Image (tube, rainbow, N blue to C red):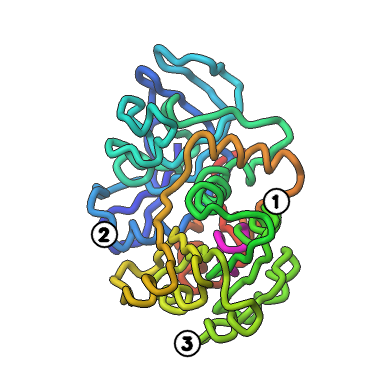
């Protein structure tokens, strides 16, 4: 089968051939039609994840059809459509046993220390997957964990977003932000969307954003002018670029949930501001199988659709990476792996 690998830190991806893997105990071999490109894949290429061992097949946005089962796999059969978490949890620690497997300290990440999804066939583990309803499309299934489930987890479980509250989504023109705008509205929030790409503002508004603002060095002033003193929740998708202004956009008692950082560097943290306003800042990592099921249910309802810019053949992976680096995509970018 064809696959794409990152041969060394900082190098372009190479297309190669490798054998179709055989499933071991608890493992499931699936055939994929498409996979998504996450900005984390670009950070892996840049060498920001020390556990990545090059050469590595990147990618962790996984869905497909089961073609072979390993010994001991239960509740799945050949021909089932499944979607996977971006990681393989151990299934034994206290986090896994309480349904918080996203916090598993022993988890292994597809595309980092496990072979990833930039290949037609991939091995996943039964601890990572759930069945996909027939009514859910391939694009929605593929981003159900990394995008949809991740956003649901961040907003509902970590940010405690309630109906009628005001939500600020930073980086709303990107592959995560556009979906966060949709989900915020579905959850009943007033959504303010920030973007550094003014040409995308109309499209973001069409997704349901109540207000769309263009990035500036002091956009918190604009936020406070259009709200009653600030927003209840910030979903911070870009990190260092917007963190300071996002924090200042919070109302008293407001909550910031950080799910992304496009440039992994420290940010200034004004402790006095956080204390005096009673604000909280939380990190939110990935999704659980419960989140994954909810994401697929949401997609099945017809209320939510994958927003995608292009679907490129695997051999165009380097051009697709460059498109994302230049912020040229409106929504997700997918790679086509098989028919």
Q: Toward the viewer: 299 or 253?
A: 253
Q: Which residue position holds label 3?
A: 217
**Mark linked to residue 305:** 1
Q: Nearer the viewer, residue 58 or 218?
A: 218
Q: Residue at x 72, y 75 (%)?
A: 202
Name the residue at 58% across, 58% down. Answer: 332
Residue ID for mark 2: 9
Q: Earlier in the sequence, mark 1 or mark 2?
A: 2
Tag of residue 22: none
Residue 125 sits in which quadrant?
top left
Q: Is residue 286 visible?
A: yes
Of helix, strand and loop, which one carries label 2?
loop
Q: Residues within 10 Å of mark 3 (few under 14, many from 20)?
A: few
Residue 33, compared with residue 28, is above or below; it is: below
Q: Quadrant of the N terminus?
A: top left
Rendered position, 120 above or below 254: above
Q: Say which of marks 2 and 3 sits in front.
A: 3
Place of residue 262 in the rendered image (x, y in percent of width and height, measured from the top left): 40, 67
State the residue at coordinates (66%, 57%).
Answer: 307
Residue interval drawn in magenta: 172-179
């Amino acid at each position: 089968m064809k696959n794409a690998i990152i041969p060394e830190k900082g190098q372009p991806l190479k297309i190669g051939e490798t054998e179709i893997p055989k499933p071991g105990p608890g493992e499931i071999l699936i055939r994929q039609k498409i996979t998504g490109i996450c900005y984390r894949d670009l950070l892996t290429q840049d060498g920001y994840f020390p556990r990545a061992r090059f050469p590595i097949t990147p990618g962790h946005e996984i869905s497909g059809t089961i073609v072979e089962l390993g010994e001991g796999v239960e509740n799945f059969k050949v021909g089932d459509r499944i979607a996977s978490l971006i990681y393989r949890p151990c299934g034994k620690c206290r986090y896994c046993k309480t349904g918080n497997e996203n916090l598993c300290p022993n988890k292994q990440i597809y595309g980092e220390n496990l072979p990833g999804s930039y290949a037609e066939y991939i091995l996943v583990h039964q601890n990572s997957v759930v069945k996909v309803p027939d009514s859910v499309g391939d694009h929605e299934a593929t981003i159900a964990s990394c995008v949809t489930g991740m956003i649901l987890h961040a907003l509902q479980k970590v940010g405690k977003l309630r109906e009628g509250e005001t939500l600020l989504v930073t980086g709303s023109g990107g592959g995560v932000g556009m979906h966060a705008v949709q989900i915020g509205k579905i959850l009943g929030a007033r959504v303010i969307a920030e973007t550094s790409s003014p040409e995308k503002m109309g499209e973001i508004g069409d997704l349901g954003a109540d207000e769309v603002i263009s990035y500036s060095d002091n956009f918190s002033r604009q936020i406070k002018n259009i709200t009653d003193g600030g927003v209840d929740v910030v979903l911070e998708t870009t990190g260092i670029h917007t963190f300071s202004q996002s924090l200042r956009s919070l109302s008293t008692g407001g909550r910031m949930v950080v799910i992304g950082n496009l440039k992994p560097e420290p940010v200034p943290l004004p402790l006095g501001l956080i204390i005096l306003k009673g604000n909280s800042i939380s990190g939110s990592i990935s999704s659980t199988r419960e989140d994954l099921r909810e994401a697929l249910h949401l997609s099945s309802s017809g209320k939510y659709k994958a927003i995608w810019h292009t679907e490129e053949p695997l051999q165009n992976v380097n051009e697709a990476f460059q498109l994302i680096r230049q912020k040229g995509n409106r929504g997700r970018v997918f790679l086509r792996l098989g028919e």
